Amino acid sequence: MTNRTPSPDTVMRLINGYWATGILAASATHSLFTHLESGAGTAAELADRARISERGAQTLLDGLLAVGLVELSEGRYRNSAEASAYLVDDKPASLAGFARLKLTHMGSLADLAEVVRVGGPVANPVVEVANNPHWEGIVTAIAAQSLPAATIAAEVLGLAGAGEISVLDVGGGSGVYSGIWLEANPAARATQLDWAPINEIARRLLTERGVADRFTTVDGDFHHTDFGTDAFDVAVYSHIAHQEGPESNIEVFTRLRQALRPGGTLVVNDYIVDDDRGGPAFPLIFASEMLLKSKRGSTWRRRDYQEWLVKAGFTDISFHSAPPATLVIAR
Ligand SMILES: C[S@@+](CC[C@H](N)C(=O)[O-])C[C@H]1O[C@@H](n2cnc3c(N)ncnc32)[C@H](O)[C@@H]1O
């Protein structure tokens, strides 16, 4: 231990962490990063393009400078490299929608102390409710995070050159995996199982991508819907295992093993913590989200996935980094 005198700075920054969420979400709401990217560089120029007050624009710029999302040089602002890559609207990897969505979730954190006391959600259950409108906001916002994972998985599995494969995506959401994989492999077909309103969103997005003719949806609850037997070459379970408890994950992995043809591959993508729960930071913090929103979910350890997949009948299991998530490939 050092003799450094503690400063209140870190604690103050964390206590006021919601300022950053609000500033970022308000800036995304008014597309400030998009306007900065296309050359607006002062509060007056941003106010004009975004049709907001100049006082408001300057306040957001001050906040964005403080959190490192813009840079200031000779009186003009510009996006930081991170803002340029991840906060400009309409870029495939844009997290602007996610920033807007998270602001709407912020109020629920007021329940966290009580949720911690009782060990689960106290109001507005999310995960266990059929057709919950919550998912409609989540699935398009999370697609930007799933896109790199789907791209890495396609490379690891060599999907582009895999010929006439058939894919099952359980809880496929926006259909981002199917979209990317069907584009990469013109002989592939994909089936997505999800709630009806979410499948409708996925069908619209895959129609826009021009691959809807090879995309089928099944509406329903994956806990009770048959996945079939020896029917698929690849199965996907992305950002679902964290909402489920161990028994449910083992049960779903077992049915997915049966649904896969011999030699078929299961792709799991999730926020996974180290075996000693010593990191990484994002999955450690995300456990609170699951305590708030699910009866049994959490961020699970690598050894949990390893153990569950072996119980489900998989023998060859590997982990691949797809920050802030981890891909698990199981055969
Ligand atoms: C966090 S999103 C992940 C979406 C997508 N897999 C991805 O990684 O981008 C969770 C998805 O699981 C779906 N889902 C959650 N519980 C479900 C259930 N019991 N039955 C069917 N779908 C469910 C939600 O509708 C949503 O599309």
Image: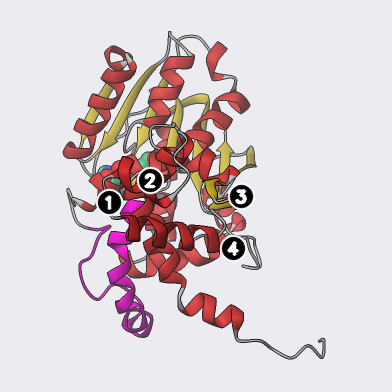
Q: CA distance from mark 1 to mark 3?
A: 23 Å
Q: Main secondary structure of the magenta part?
A: helix
Place of residue 316 in the rendered image (x, y in percent of width and height, measured from the top left)? 64, 37
The magenta region covers 100-128
- Secondary structure beneath dot 4 equals helix
Q: Do callouts 2 and 3 mark residues in contact (Cβ within 8 Å)?
A: no
10 Å crowding of disc 4: few (<14), some (14-19), many (20+)? few
Q: Position of residue 223 (x, y in %)?
A: 28, 47
Residue 110 is a magenta residue: yes
Label annotation for residue 73: 3
Eye-nearest disc, 4 or 3: 3
- Residue shown at the point (43%, 8%) measured from the top left: 187
Res. 281 mark: 4
Measured as percent of width and height from the top left, residue 48 is found at: 31, 43
Report whether residue 297 is seen. no
Quadrant for the N terminus in the image: bottom right
The mark nearer the N terminus, 2 or 3, is 2
Q: Which residue is mark 2?
A: 46
**35 versus 44 height, above or below:** above
Which mark is first along the chain, 1 or 4? 1
Residue type marked 2: Leu
